[in-house]
Amino acid sequence: MLLQQRPAARGIALAVLATLIWSGNFIVARYSSQSVPPVMLAALRWSCAALLMLPLGAAAFWRQRQLVQQHWPLLLLAAFTGISVFNTLVYVAGHYSEAIMLALIGTTSSPVFSFTLARIFLKEKIPPQRLAGLLLCIGGILLLLSRGSWQTLLHLRFTKGDWWILGAALSFAVYNILARKKPAELTPATFLFSTFWMGTLLLLPAAAIEYMWQPYSLPFGWQLAGIVLYLGLGTSVIAFFCWNKAIAYLGAARAAIFGNLIPIFSSLEAVWLLGETISWMHLAGMLLVIGGLVLANLRMGTGNKKQPTSAGRQRLAAAEKH
């Protein structure tokens, strides 16, 4: 029993840590929107992350270079969706929408996309209990989105930034599926090293085109350096290590539910960093989200438990080892 519960507990802890780190990404996207163009911000972030991965993943990558060559289409697509496209669209959306709206819309839609894609492509079953948990999470997010008013919700209109963030959420849902399909023998360090460098190389020409389209001057200084380091080390290297291991432990659809914690963390950060206040509506929405997460991850009953499949055992063994 303990051995069966340990992987799930570790997966939950890693997913929570990843979302806590990622929650600041939306604040940075909004804060930097007037000073750093979106593609350049993404290129700086992933260039930093790729360089930081050199001492962490270069040796593992070299040892598994034949395996990387064998699975390069999957790695390239994962790099494109999770590295090049996802965060770039978040930074584009930051030019049009407030940080809290980015977090709310992105985290409401991403689990829905992930559940749907996992059901279609991975044939993952969605138990009624987990579906109920997801709906409860969405209810909490909608309460936050409506600010406690049905009239606000009924008259809600999506802005240009909202559509961009929806595209980002869909891209990250695809990345979740691809990360789940990662060969068990491919270590997390090799996977991240490969996708980080591929995604960065895809972003560099896009950043050059952005500059040629509309030249600009970067605000070089300690502030920009701190932002790039936070994005490159925190939201990229550390958070992605945690997230990919969480997917190995929990599965793509189950891990995606934890994305609903991001607006909660973002709201707390807004109080801490921006001096905003939390109302009853914020507290009620947070409680609904947390309740949905608990419901989606409860083990129902003790009898008739299925043993992990061979593929599931391989993923757990790889996660435990690395």
Image (cartoon, grey):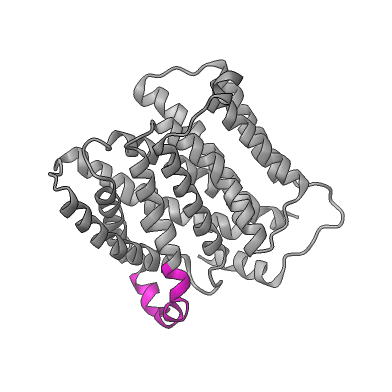
| Residue 282 visible from this viewpoint | no
Q: Which residues are magenta?
A: 58-76
**Residue 293: quarter of image:** top right
The vertical placement of 307 against 99, above or below, is below
Main secondary structure of the magenta stretch: helix
Residue that appears at 66% across and 41% down: 134
From the top left corner, tell me how far across and down residue 322 is, in percent: 50, 65
The vertical placement of 152 against 122, above or below, is above
User: In which quadrant is the N terminus drawn?
Assistant: bottom right
Residue that appears at 45% across and 74% down: 73
Nearer to us in this view, 216 or 228? 216
Is 261 positioned to the left or the right of 292 in the image? left
From the top left corner, tell me how far across and down residue 192 is, in percent: 41, 63
Task: Count the marks.
Answer: 0
Q: Magenta stretch containing residue 188, yes or no?
A: no
Nearer to us in this view, 162 or 253? 162
From the top left corner, tell me how far across and down residue 310 is, in percent: 69, 72
Residue that appears at 60% across and 67% down: 315
Is 258 positioned to the left or the right of 310 in the image? left
| Residue 64 visible from this viewpoint | yes
The vertical placement of 162 against 119, above or below, is above
From the top left corner, tell me how far across and down residue 253 is, in percent: 62, 53
Residue that appears at 22% across and 42% down: 36
